[in-house]
Amino acid sequence: MSHANASPLAGTSPAFSYVHERSNIWRLTIAQALAGANSVVVYATGAVVGSTLAPSPTLATLPISIFVVGMAACTLPSGMIAQRHGRRAAFLTGTGCGVLAGLLAAQAVVLGSFWLFCAATFFGGAYAAVVLSFRFAAAECAPKERRPRALSAVMAGGVFAGVIGPQLVTHTMYLSLPYLFAATFLAQAAVAALSALILLGVRLPSPTAAEVAGGRPLGVIARQPRFIAAVICGVVSYLLMNFLMTAAPLAMRMCGLSQESSNLGLQWHVIAMYAPSFFTGRLMTRFGAPRVVMAGLALTAASAAVGLTGMDVAHFWGTLILLGVGWNFGFVGASALVLECHRPEERTRVQSLNDFAVFGTMTFGSFLSGGLLSAYGWDTILWLSFAPLSAAIFVLASTVTGRPSQIAG
């Protein structure tokens, strides 16, 4: 075990261990906020810049779709880097991709290059893929009784991301005129670099030999009805959140609403995504993960219904806020169901498989949203959301009932 990846908790006094635990959690929480802000910048500007640079209106949301492709493509590689070299190495690789994303995006705006902008958002997606593991890293550095607090603290970083990201766009988008958003992307690169500096101080244990070599074949795990239902609900929750959030800023622009109102709508959406995490765990303990997932799917349906009632700022904001809360209940609840389907030594592989399935499928929603919005309008986007929601509700009700399954061993 290398010195960089050795656990600082091993062989130390409880006070020393607790100091390192708190340091890790604070660093991961701040890094979560900064990384989340980077993602918000992409969602707030991607479709707008895309509509300006794209050779066809149907490609306007392609940069955001490429962002999701980057998340899906880099989920498994980031896990392999963490398994071989430790989580901190994966974190720093991800933040490096975040810096590169901002620099390339700024250059793309100045040069008017649509495809360079798409390359930039791919690296932004790679950064986001690494950020997915922050919450698991926080749990690994805390004893069992404090893991819920660690997870909640890191998820709280997403709330701050919902404020930092939109404000970053609002205060920088006109600084580099006539190149709209060029300064924003340079600021995004600086934020990613700051995140790297913060993550340099994180110290986490390396994977155990059992985690590297043990466990059942993934095919056996993936055939469990509970795992299938968990993946489907996670896919639908994240796919529809991305499907609607990708299209919303461009739809607001098409309705004549200001970029500032779009930025604020995304700000409240991201806050709504992460703020419920402070009590989602308690709800799952009291009512069970399947009921929380069901509530999340219902809230997502309600968000689409609100959007169908009008095209004013309030309707878009209501849609985005309900969509954020629905995503939290649906995705966090589905993630809890995944945790019921594997043994401790199988967790890294199974969690990576789940994330790969979620983000791999989510790319289709991103690719479709721009073309559908351009050809058929915002209402069609909303109506289409009800089909996958109905399928997920049916699967959840049919296959996930009663108490959590018991995993042998």
Image (tube, rainbow, N blue to C red):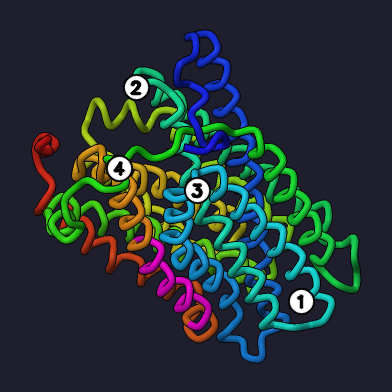
Whether the residues at callouts 3 and 4 have beta carbons within 8 Å, the answer is: no
> What is the distance, in whole Å, between disc 2 and disc 3 at their CAs?
24 Å
Q: Position of residue 111 (x, y in %)?
A: 82, 81
Which of the two residues, 56 or 193, is positioned nearer the viewer here?
193
Where disc 2 sits, the SS reads: helix
Which residue lies under the disc numbered 1? 108
Determine which residue is flagged by label 2: 144
Q: Nearer the viewer, mark 2 or mark 3?
A: 3
Q: Can residue 331 be found in the magenta stretch?
A: no
Start and end of the magenta stretch? 358-371
Disc 2 + disc 1, Cβ < 8 Å? no
Residue drawn where x is 63% and y is 76% of the image: 118
The percent coordinates of residue 287 (x first, y second) are 22, 30
Residue 102 at x, y = what percent?
Answer: 73, 62
**Nearer-N-terminus badge (2/1):** 1
Residue contact between numbered discs 2 and 3, judged by CB atoms under 8 Å: no
Q: Nearer the viewer, mark 2 or mark 1?
A: 2
> Does residue 291 show up?
no
